[in-house]
Image (tube, helix red, strand yellow):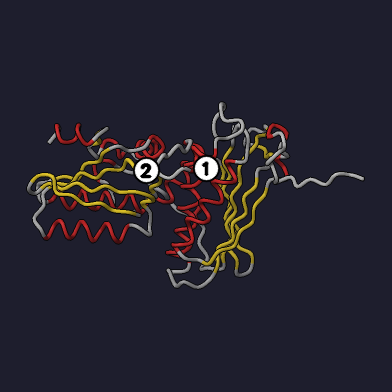
Amino acid sequence: MYIEQREIIIHIGIIGLQGRLDANAAPALKEIWEEYASRGMHSLLVDLHRVEFIDSIGISTLVNGMKQLRSRGGDLKLIGIQPSVRSIFELMTLDKVFTIYESEEEALRGL
Amino acid sequence: MLEQTNPLDNSSADLRVFPLESARINLRVPARLDCLPVLCATVREFCATIPGLLNANDSPPNRATINAPGTTSYSNFVYSIELVLQEAASNIVRHGYQESGKGFLELAVSLPEVEDLAGAKRRAIVLELTDNALPFDPTAQLVDTPDPLNMPESGYGLYLIRKLTDHLEYSRFGSLNNLKMVKYVH
């Protein structure tokens, strides 16, 4: 999995993911959550436009990051979930848990 | 002299007369997480050779669109199949083999006609996973529906397998586990 990190506003970061978000990719993503926590980041936008596949470990990793950030008063929000991935989120009622935006522009307006 | 044809070679054949019963793939890989994308890609390719499976308008399937990185045009059906396989195989590697890096995973994919619970004949994609890891029967586990107000950080795998398949069957033969996962195509 390819991971691109940017800090768009102080204490708010954006991460663009590409490829498969699965058990193989999860450890790298968990390291990023910890890195952002150590830097005092409050919130993260995770761009999933180019993520073609997410399994339950990938989903758990996103839930883990969201819980960490919410416990510090922040949040982890998602951008651009592909239709097939969204159907799985809906099956698991995760669409009621995460804030999901269609685009980065929409997400920035929602901050 | 009779002309011999390979039923899996559809390069020039009419895809509408593809012999579905003969479609079968067997693949054995090391029981490692980094091998699971190979299994998933195999199933994806298998699905892409079946006319009408991906979408009523895909005949023949548009492989370039389906497989192009970043374009992500999986149909929900193919995504479900790939996800079910990933979840089952990942459970075997992580829990059955405890990520030892030893052992194997054998996948068989086929497209037989099966009887559903009402006795009607249905075309189905069947995934069979065989391994020699610790015994584990996923059909015997209690699976809770995820609670959005108290979202756990794990335990989604079996839930997804149950929700996305039409039939699950587990058998233990000697030292081998065999998990059969069936999903009706239409």
Is residue A70 visible to us here?
no
Subunit bearing disc 2: B
At 61% across and 30% down in the image, what residue appears? B59
Q: Secondary structure at mark 2?
A: loop
Q: Are marks 2 and 1 in contact (CB under 8 Å)?
A: no
Q: Please identify the quarter of the rendering in which residue B122 is found.
A: top right
Residue to which mark 2 is pinned: B145
- Name the amino acid type tagged 1: Thr
Residue B89 location, x and y as percent? 49, 57
Is residue A36 visible to us here?
yes
Q: Nearer the viewer, residue B161 or B8?
A: B8
Residue to which mark 1 is pinned: B165
Residue A64 location, x and y as percent? 24, 53
Q: Nearer the viewer, residue B154 or B111?
A: B111
Task: Using a 10 Å C-alpha cutoff, classify the residue at mark 2 as few (fewer than 14 neighbours), some (14 to 19) or many (20 or more).
Answer: few
Residue B136 location, x and y as percent? 50, 61
Give how far apart the Cα atoms at labels 2 and 1 are. 15 Å
Q: Secondary structure at mark 1?
A: loop
Screen quadrant of the N terminus of chain A: bottom left
Label 2 or label 1, whichever comes before in sequence order: 2
Residue B26 appears left or right of B62? right
- When the figure is inspected, residue B71 is found, relative to residue A28, above or below; the finding is above
Q: Please identify the quarter of the rendering in which residue B95 is found.
A: bottom left
Front: mark 2 or 1: 1
- When the figure is inspected, residue A111 is found, relative to residue B36, above or below; the finding is above
